[in-house]
Amino acid sequence: MDNVRNRTALTLLVGIPSAFLLALFVVPMLTMFLATFYRFDPTAGVVREISLTNYVRFFSDGYYLEVLAQTAVISGIVVLISLVLGYPAAMLLLRLQGMGRMIFIGLLLLPLLTSAVVVTYGWLILLGRGGFVNQVLQDIGLIRAPLQFMYTKLGVVIGLVHVVLSFMTLSIASSLQRIDDKLIWAAHSLGASPFMVFRKIIWPLSLPGVVAGSMLVFALSMSAYATPVLIGGARVKVMSYLIYQQQMVLYDLPFGATLAVILMVTTSVALGFATLRATRGGILS
Amino acid sequence: MSKSVELRNVWKSYGADTPVLRDVSLRVMPGERLCLLGPSGSGKTTTLNVIAGFTKPDRGSVLIGGVPQEGIAPHKRRVGVVFQSYALFPHMTVYENVAFGLKMHKYPAADIPARVRECLQLVRLTDVEKRYPAQLSGGQQQRVALARALAMQPDVLLLDEPLSNLDAKLRREMRAELLDLHSRTQVTMIFVTHDQEEALTLGHRIAVLRDGQLQQVGTPDELYNTPSNLFVADFIGESNLLPGRVTRHEGGVATVQGNGFLCDARAMGLCQPGDTVTVAIRPHNLTFVSSRDKALGEGRVLRVTYMGGRTEYEVAVGPHVVLVWLAADERPAHAVPMEPGSVVYLAPRDAAKVLCYPETKATT
């Protein structure tokens, strides 16, 4: 009797979430994948004939490959900058105590709790020609004339870094926190200067957090939409913008789906490669 | 290579709380094995941290080899540390762990492999160079920690509770190995422990700490036979502590009257007639005598426990329970039945080792 009850409970426990996952995630994904093999005709609409025209079009026109490359490059730069800024932030987080720590955590959580669109609009105000950033830079005398941030890759990177930085910081912080204090003392007692302790002990042991954070930030940047589109406009083209164009403006759903699938595959391959390297290097297990 | 270590009037507090170290002054001779002994929270580990430079004293100074260490960062001091948790670098092999100190001190690269092997042989560990700490047993990890600390031939070796994490058998083994290691390297060793037996067997001298203050520093013999206060008498070895009142004091010997006993005791402090004092007698310093006149008191045997090497008697004397230990082959000088309930007369074997302190258990 008990066995049957357990079996039913287990089936429901696994079954209901699986059904959700299937219906709301897997099926749409498969549908989209299928759509990449269809064709779009300006007069007839979506033609359900299997062919590879969309893929051929993507790879033969240099334009699309360029946009994919630009998306990847921007994402890579965002990873590097958020690593350079996020690592010290993580170290600071661990060193703070009490009220200071609570405030700092609040600051870190703020961009996560706010919608990316809202954050980006904030940047629009700051990055304009007459915006706050330019005002400050001119006032302190670093520049003579206002710099152009809007509609540039630099502006897009700045906006993206802000949105994703907390992910990187928290990921690194959790790794750093696991490092036993005594290891640092032991290293000192063996003659390691603070720099050596960082290089030989802290950095290697924090790598899991660094890798996890980088992968997360890369995925977020590759798929980012609001930030690159609002700040970059039509001048800085990323894949998500193209997808929007194809789907919403040109109504070429099959090609839009193709772009989306290629973006997903590219990101997955990059992340998979990173995981492989990390596992083999003994960073992740 | 081994140097002296000196602490001069060291004070240390964390925050606004009571000081962890109070006016600690101590001198350790080169090549000596000194044991810092005390209950938890007595400041022993803090003392190690101050010597190693991990913690800065609020007041006072630390000298190694006569050189004041103020302003000298821990990585510039030649102090080897073996932590209680061993603190082996988990992402490095045994070889890399032991070689770490050598690399940091720019030891000639070509000589490192030989030196690492030498150190591992010193701690009797072979064939583990390529393993990671997680793949080693506790005992092996400790040996690696020792090898790592000794690789650079430090001036001083600090060990925090080196035997606490080990089981009884391993503890005895490691104890012997540490002594052997010391005789081969002659490095100044400072141990921290809360186990008085460990202190008695490992230390040339022992420094007893309590609440951040040094109670007594001396050889195991001095601490065992002439503890300077009640705390030390109670902490080291087993002692019968009997409260009483001084009736007479002559030439350093006080006559103490207690509930159920009367005896002479060597005064270890100001014990004037009328004072309330505590008499300390070690269980093996007591024996049974045939009559009342030679005894310090009369008692009734409560329990007899045969311990193999000795027999332990619990005797009720007045309101106190007094422990008497007789060696296995010893028989009292008379045939008195030694069963629970028997009436017996107790007397000290060596009157010089009966001590009294101007404190009571409540005031210590």
Image: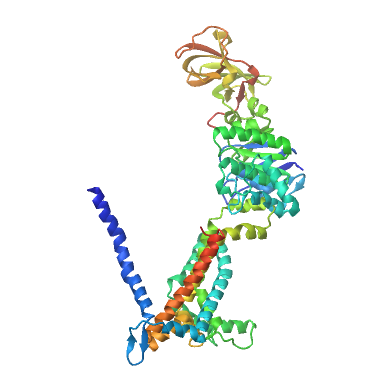
Q: Position of residue B193 (x, y in %)?
A: 60, 37
Coloration of the structure image:
rainbow
From this view, report whether residue B90 is shown above or below residue B192: below
Q: Which residue corresponds to the image point at 47% horizontal and 71% vertical from the top-left?
A: A268
Nearer to me, B146 or A270:
A270
From this view, report whether residue B2 is shown above or below residue B242: below
From this view, report whether residue A274 is shown above or below residue B331: below
Q: Which residue corresponds to the image point at 47% horizontal and 67% vertical from the top-left?
A: A106
Nearer to me, A25 or B4:
A25
Residue B195, picture quadrant: top right
Q: Position of residue B187 (x, y in %)?
A: 72, 40
Nearer to me, B287 or A89:
A89
Nearer to me, B68 or A235:
A235
Q: Which residue corresponds to the image point at 47% horizontal and 20% vertical from the top-left?
A: B319
From this view, report whether residue A196 is shown above or below residue B148: below
Residue A196 in view here: yes
Residue B43 in view here: no
Q: Position of residue A37 (x, y in %)?
A: 38, 81
Q: Position of residue A136 (x, y in %)?
A: 59, 81
Q: Which residue corresponds to the image point at 53% horizontal and 67% vertical from the top-left?
A: A274
Tally of numbered discs: 0
Q: Which residue is the extreme one toward the bottom? A: A43
